[in-house]
Image: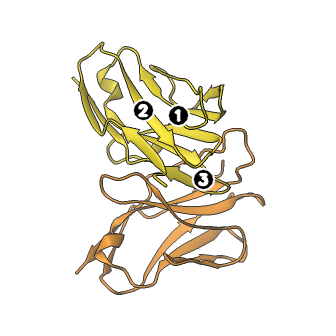
Amino acid sequence: NAGVTQTPKFRILKIGQSMTLQCTQDMNHNYMYWYRQDPGMGLKLIYYSVGAGITDKGEVPNGYNVSRSTTEDFPLRLELAAPSQTSVYFCASRGQETQYFGPGTRLLVL
Amino acid sequence: DAKTTQPNSMESNEEEPVHLPCNHSTISGTDYIHWYRQLPSQGPEYVIHGLTSNVNNRMASLAIAEDRKSSTLILHRATLRDAAVYYCILSDYGGSQGNLIFGKGTKLSVKP
C-alpha cells in the first residue's frame, strides 16, 4: 500500500498564479483532509471531505478550493496565489480511529 | 474540541526512557486521547491512542490518569530517530468533521 501520496513535493509560485496540489489515497477511506502548517506551528484544517461529491470548509478555507470526484483523489486548488499561502500542505485520510498523512507539499509564493 | 497543554520542549538521552506529559482538564467522556508525532520534514504519523485504560503498542505506551485529566506518552528507550514534535490531541470522531486539532506539541530532542 502506498497510503497517502502527494504531488508535487515542492513548488515556487509567483503572486497571482494558480496551481493544484494533488492527493491520492489507496485505503478506500471516505474521510479526507487538507491541512496547512506554517513554521513552528501546528496544522490547521483548510477543507475536508466525508465522501465522493461532499466537501466542506475547515478553519482556514479562504483562497482555496477543493473537489472530490472519486474516493481516492482529493485535489486542492489555489486560484490566485498570495505570499500568505506560503506553507507546507498536508493531505490526510481517516481510517476508523487513525489519520494517515501524506509527505506534504512545500509551497513558496514570491 | 477540548484543549491540551504540553511542554514546548523536552530533552532525553539516547536509550533512556522518555515521559511526555499532556494535560487535558476539560476532556469529555467520549474523547479519545491521541498521540501523533512529526519527524523533521515529514507528515505527522500516528503513535498511539486510548480512552480510559493504559495502552501499549510497538512504538510506545500511553498512561492515562484515573480522572482522565492528564496522560503521559512513554517511549521506553529513546533513539535518535525519536527526535520529533509530539502532539497530544483529543478527538471523539463523533463530530461531522472528524479532523484533528493540532497545538504546537512538544519538541523532543534526543542526545547521543
Mark 2 belongs to which amino acid?
Gln
Front in this rendered view, residue B62 or A2: A2
Task: State which chain is coloured yellow.
Answer: A
What residue appears at the point 30 percent right and 57 percent down from the top-left corner?
B40
Task: Residue at 33% x, 78% y: name it.
Answer: B79
Q: Determine which residue is flagged by label 2.
A: A22
- The residue nearer to you, when weighing B5 against B89, is B89
Alpha-carbon neighbours of circle 1 within 10 Å: few (<14), some, or many (≥20)?
some
Q: Colour of chain B?
A: orange
In what element is the residue under mark 1? loop
Camera-nearest label, 3 or 1: 1
Image spot of residue A72 (x, y percent) = 56, 38
- Taking B68 as reference, is B38 left or right? left
Which of marks 1 and 2 precedes in the sequence?
A: 2
Residue position marked by numbered label 3 in the rendering: B3
Which residue is labeled 1 in the image?
Answer: A73
Q: Chain of mark 2?
A: A
In the image, residue B86 sits, relative to residue B81, either above or below, namely: above
